[in-house]
Image (cartoon, grey):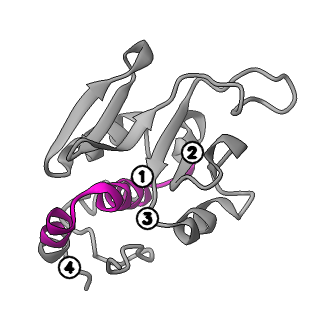
Amino acid sequence: MRAARRTNPGDTAYAGVVPDDDGDRPARVEDVHELALTMPHVTVEHGTGDNPIYQVGGKSFVFFRNPRPDAADPDTGERYADVIVFWVDSQADKQALVQDESSPFFTTAHFNGHPSVLLRAGRIGELTRHELAEVIQDAWLSRASARRAATWLAAHPSS
């Protein structure tokens, strides 16, 4: 089992990855790309519609999803065109992110049992850049090899 990686506001576990002067601002979609690429050993594949898929060791950890029938506006039925998928380490981590209905994270029946959460790009600003960095780093850690994860965690210790 990997060490806990979630942090509380003000925790410096990720200091140096997200500059303090930039971490409290609302997150933007551009931050997903930038933060994913700051993680080591990352490659980018392009899926359907040329959507980026960020991988470590050939395993996806963040990707931009095409509109699908399982993620749609409950009132209009219109498919969400702005869904981002983030891997998580466990079902407990997933539930921690999706159980609060006010959270911007969600899941669908299609992802039952799958270690990932969804986020609409249109709601990304509900997270700070620092919070988004934590989610991306956790996603990377959940998919990286044990050796790569241990090396990264050793270089970014909690205070």
> Which mark, by number, is residue 25?
1
> Does 127 appear in magenta?
yes
Q: Is residue 98 left or right of residue 145?
A: right
Q: Amino acid at mark 2?
A: Leu
Residue count near mark 4 (Cα–Cα under 10 Å), binned few <14, some 14–19, many ≥20: few
Residue where numbered disc 3 is placed: 89
Calculate the distance from the C-alpha at mark 2 to the C-alpha at mark 3: 14 Å
Q: Which mark is residue 87?
A: none
Residue contact at pointers 1 and 2, CB within 8 angstroms: no
Position of residue 55 in the picture relative to residue 88 (left or right) = left
Task: Name the secondary structure under disc 3.
Answer: loop
Label 4 – label 3 distance at C-alpha: 18 Å
Of tags 1 and 2, the one toward the viewer is: 2
Q: Is residue 26 left or right of residue 155?
A: right
Identify the residue position indicated by label 2 in the image.
118
Pointer 4 or 2: first along the chain: 2
* Callout 2–callout 3 Cβ contact below 8 Å: no
Looking at marks 4 and 3 on the same chain, the residue that comes earlier in the sequence is marked by 3
Calculate the distance from the C-alpha at mark 4 to the C-alpha at mark 2: 27 Å
Q: Position of residue 16 (x, y in %)?
A: 18, 64
Give the amino acid type for the residue marked by disc 4 in the picture: Pro
- Marks 3 and 1, the one that precedes in the sequence: 1
Residue 139 placement: quadrant: bottom left
Q: Is residue 26 visible?
A: no
Badge 1 amino acid:
Arg
Residue position marked by numbered label 4 in the rendering: 157
Nearest to the eye among marks 3 and 1: give it: 3
Q: Which image quarter is the N terminus in?
A: bottom left
- The boundaries of the magenta stretch are 126-152
